Amino acid sequence: MKRLHRTHLKSRDGIIYIENPAINQLGWATHGFLTRQSGVSLPPYDSLNVSLNNGDHLNHVLSNRMRIAKAFGFENDRLILLKQMQLDGIYLLNNPLETEGTLLAYDAILTNLPHQILGIQTADCIPILILDEKKKVIGAVHAGRQGTALEITRKVLRRMKEEWQCSERDFLITLGPSIGPCCYEIDEKVFLKEWEPFSIRKREGKWMVDLATINIAQLKLEGITEEQIYRVDLCTCCNSDLFFSYRGEGQTGRQLSFIGII
């Protein structure tokens, strides 16, 4: 597994982001894991908040989205966002959406259509970008605690195999910034027994959980190798200058991670 750190931060028209160089080498996909910096939203949403569902001013959010679209060279109405349900619903985008601003009630979206920008909004959960290097199929996944428990990443890979006959050896997968085991504590009532190898028992009834490593283990069960996986190894809670963190801040914004076929 290859790890991406602060040294991989880049800037495009003032927008700070992290990218996977292996995706850029393909030549047919655009993507980015954005930070909270370089937007217009005011505290506690400062500053590049892309979510309309947390109390931020509408004009600020729309301005932030337009800044992102301009910086990365796509039309603003091409950005498709999900009404993330913390479940395992997967949406297949077989035709361009006709209604601009439609929020789809799913936690993953897949397509082989060009000029469709698949976006995930996060503030601790894991944004996962997936592509098939040969079939030119892409996916964007929102994996929180519940989605991880439902093994959404495994289900996404299976769906891509079913719909487009993708092969596990052709997948390239990148996990974006998320809360780390240093900061993510959960109660025993929602802790799963199979997560023990990836967790530390902090005290009675409390566990520190590494959601990213759990998702990576699930990917490997689908035949994905270490060489196919990249991870932005930055905790959203620890790196509050770069990322929004619900655990760390409570009321806050959401950063965008996206992928599209050029």
Image (cartoon, helix red, strand yellow):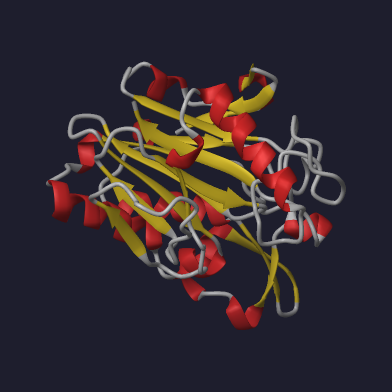
From where the camera sits, is residue 236 visible? Answer: no
Q: Residue 202: percent from the left, percent from the top?
A: 74, 67
The quadrant in which the C terminus is found is: top left
Q: Residue 257: percent from the left, percent from the top?
A: 54, 40
Q: Please indicate whether residue 75 sits to the left or right of residue 14 in the image.
A: left
Q: Please indicate whether residue 79 sits to the left or right of residue 53 in the image.
A: left
Name the residue located 34 percent from the left edge and 33 percent from the top edge: 115
Image quarter for residue 144? bottom right
Name the residue located 23 percent from the left edge and 50 percent from the top edge: 94
Residue 84 or 66: which is nearer the viewer? 66
Q: Residue 182: percent from the left, percent from the top?
A: 73, 52
Going by the picture, which residue comes out furthest to the right? 43
Image quarter for residue 38? top right
Name the residue located 50 percent from the left edge and 75 percent from the top edge: 193
The quadrant in which the N terminus is found is: top left
Q: Please indicate whether residue 129 sits to the left or right of residue 6 in the image.
A: left
Looking at the image, residue 214 lies above or below residue 242 = below
Going by the picture, which residue comes out furthest to the bottom? 189
Name the residue located 68 percent from the left edge and 38 percent from the top edge: 63
From where the camera sits, is residue 114 visible? Answer: yes
Residue 31 or 224: which is nearer the viewer? 31
Numbered-mark total = 0
Looking at the image, residue 128 lies above or below residue 33 = below
Q: Please indicate whether residue 249 sits to the left or right of residue 82 in the image.
A: right
Q: Residue 230: percent from the left, percent from the top?
A: 46, 34
